[in-house]
Amino acid sequence: MRFRRKRRSVYRFILKPLFWLLLLGIWTTIVFLSTGTFLSQPVLAVINQIEAPGEILYRSQQRLQDSSGNYWQVILFKQVQIGQPPLVNLRLVGFPGVAELIHPQPLRITTPTGEILTANDVFLVEAPAPTIGQYDVRNILPNLPVESLQLSLPLAGDRFINISVPRFVVQEWQEVAAKA
């Protein structure tokens, strides 16, 4: 009996502090992981440069969320070919079933001051898929303020899908447009 009592007190003496140390370790890990998540800043994506004979392509690609919670690939690219003026296009790609974009309809770009700019649709008849839109932003991009914007993609029945574009993405787009 004495042995059992002594054995129980040893277990209590060893296991109780170990249990509390384990809980403290788990709590500390959770605090550090959550703090890192809240303090992390958005990372600027790298501007890709792809070279082919007689052609250079500069590209910025982001994944942005629309007002309904769906994600879109937002790709701005500048295509420079020898002897031709450069093309600067904004391609928006949604997942299948998200929406059917209407072609040829312009993209509306709304600045924070309420100014609405329009970009012409590159796909005059039909897009490669119903959730793809591509717009000529060559003349618009130099006039855009380096502030957050709203893109409005045209749908049937005068409806739009709205995508908020953060300031750092607009800045990246202007860097792509400035490439030689």
Image: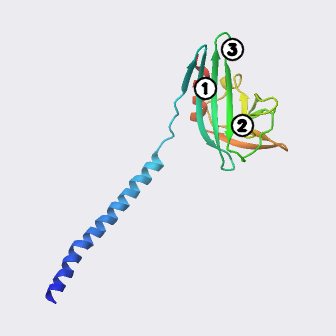
Q: Nearer the viewer, mark 3 or mark 2?
A: 2
Label ID, residue 19: none
- Please name the amino acid that badge 1 sits on: Gln
Residue identified by numbered label 3: 85
Residue furthest to the top in view is 83
Q: Residue at x 68, y 30 (%)?
A: 90
**Distance between mark 3 and mark 1 Cα atoms:** 17 Å
Q: Nearer the viewer, mark 3 or mark 1?
A: 3
Which mark sits nearer the N-terminus, 3 or 2?
Answer: 3
**Distance between mark 3 and mark 2 Cα atoms:** 24 Å
Label ID, residue 174: 1
Q: Is residue 55 visible?
A: yes
Q: Identify the element where label 1 is drawn.
A: helix
Indicate whether 26 appears above or below 104: below
**Would you call the spot at circle 3 few (<14 residues within 10 Å), some (14-19), or many (20 or more)?**
few
- Please name the amino acid that badge 3 sits on: Pro
**Distance between mark 2 and mark 1 Cα atoms:** 22 Å
Q: Residue at x 60, y 22 (%)?
A: 57
- Please name the amino acid that badge 2 sits on: Ile
Label ID, residue 132: 2
Percent x, y of residue 46: 51, 30
In which image quadrant can residue 13 be found? Answer: bottom left
In which image quadrant can residue 169 be found? Answer: top right
**Would you call the spot at circle 2 few (<14 residues within 10 Å), some (14-19), or many (20 or more)?**
many
Q: Nearer the viewer, mark 2 or mark 1?
A: 2
